[in-house]
Image (cartoon, rainbow, N blue to C red):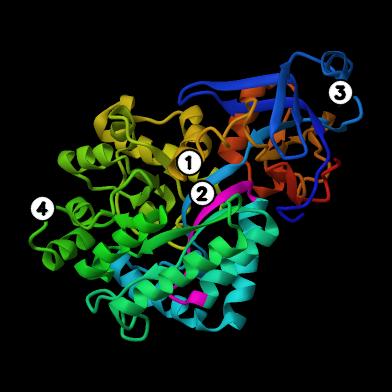
Amino acid sequence: MAASASIPKTVYLGTFVHCVSLSDLEISEKGAIGVDENGVIQFVEKNVDLAQVHEKHSDWKEAKVTELKGNSFFFPGFIDTHTHAPQHPNTGLFGKTTLLSWLETYTFPTESSFSSLEKASPIYTNFVSRTLSHGTTTCAYYATIHVPATNLLADICLSRGQRALVGRVCMNSHSMSPDYYRDATLESALADSKASIDYIHSIDPQGDIVRPIVTPRFAPSCTAECLSALGDLAKSHDAFIQTHISENLGEIELVKELFPKSESYTAVYDETNLLTEKTILAHAIHLDQKERETIKARGAKISHCPASNTALTSGCAPIREYLDMGLTIGLGTDVSGGFSPSILEECRQAIWTSRFRAMGNGDDVKLSTQEALYLATRGGAKVVGLEGKVGGFEVGMEWDAQMICLGEVAEGGEKEGVFESGPVDVWGWESMEDRVNKWVYSGDDRNCVAVWVRGRLVHKTAKFQG
């Protein structure tokens, strides 16, 4: 359903699960949420049936009703704060590489081929569909240096109704941009970035679904002049910025060589006006204390990409320390450094990464299930500038949601439709909190049977009855 399609007033009945805060996961087993024709939540009721809803909200008696059956619950849509759509064909290909050699071996050759829209179109279409099927309602996308392909990705997101920040990648430096895949000049890099910004504004002037984002790939791929010009471009358009920082020790040493006058990797961005309240910094694994304080002072946000960080042996980000000092953090899949388009998988990986750190630093650094889910929803919403609009189920927020259905084991241990119903087995004795935990640790896209953005149904499976 297109993002602009009309929708009826709808009452959603059943169990609702969302994060109220970083440590508080709220479960309402007999809830009702009323969503109006604009996709905005107008009421949230707990411990009610449909008759009670109609008695209290008489003007909703003619509203459509979507009611959950069986082992199902509603959960907010996931927010992917960092991913590379053109790298989708390389998912799972790492070889024996680390970051810099991986870019040269796999990434740059694939991205350079997107000068052909014939090549780009099926990849982008498939990837957006994949992310939606995993319950991701918002993505911060890196495209390539090509304006037509970047605009195509924005078109696809808008037509599918997925919220997206779409950025044309900038890379003009000879140091970490190959000859065959580089902005020809500083002037062309700026002109092409502005062209994509203007195009995205033209197809979605209010930015309700698709917004542009200024995207210097990372400091080694851009000259200082280019970084500064991009900072000015973002300011002039009041645009978001996304880039990478301190992902890999070798990368950090390269930054020191390329920017010898800057005190740190963070300082490079700060000195070029790229650290703002609208900046998304991917990875941020190896930040010293002063860098952390600078990022907090500027209001910049961090995208934690644990699967990618492990796959490329980049390191384990100290997320507990970042949270304790008040940094804003969301989760990112970082495909294809990450091996899955699933934010649910990133929840697991974020928990595992925190436990790897706990083995040497004590249990206090562990992330809980609730905290990982918070990063995947409300935390991500803060990162992409949608705080208070999505990420939870409250009056005034928009209905970005996914319907989760879990399998049920019958007497004798048989499970009907075992392959179609996903890997989560529910035996009947589990509490709702148990069922949520089972989903987090072993669920997949087969459990996500429907997805809504702004109240519009943007994905469904054959199991959805609504």
Residue placed at 19% from the left, 57% from the top?
268
Q: Residue lying furthest right in this view?
A: 62
Residue highlighted by disc 4: 263
Q: Which of marks 1 and 2 precedes in the sequence?
A: 2
Is label 3 or label 2 in front? Answer: 3
Secondary structure beneath dot 1 equals: helix
Q: Amino acid at mark 3?
A: Asp
The residue that label 3 is drawn on is: 59
Count the labels in the image: 4
Say which residue label 1 marks. Answer: 380
Residue at 64 percent of width and 73 percent of height: 122
Q: Which residues are magenta?
A: 134-147
Check if mark 4's residue and mark 3's residue have beta carbons within 8 Å. no
Mark with earlier residue (2, 4): 2
**How many angstroms separate mark 2 from mark 1 (CA)?**
7 Å
Q: What kind of residue is marked 1?
A: Gly
Q: Position of 260 compared to 447: left or right?
A: left
Structural distance between the alpha carbons of marks 1 and 3: 34 Å
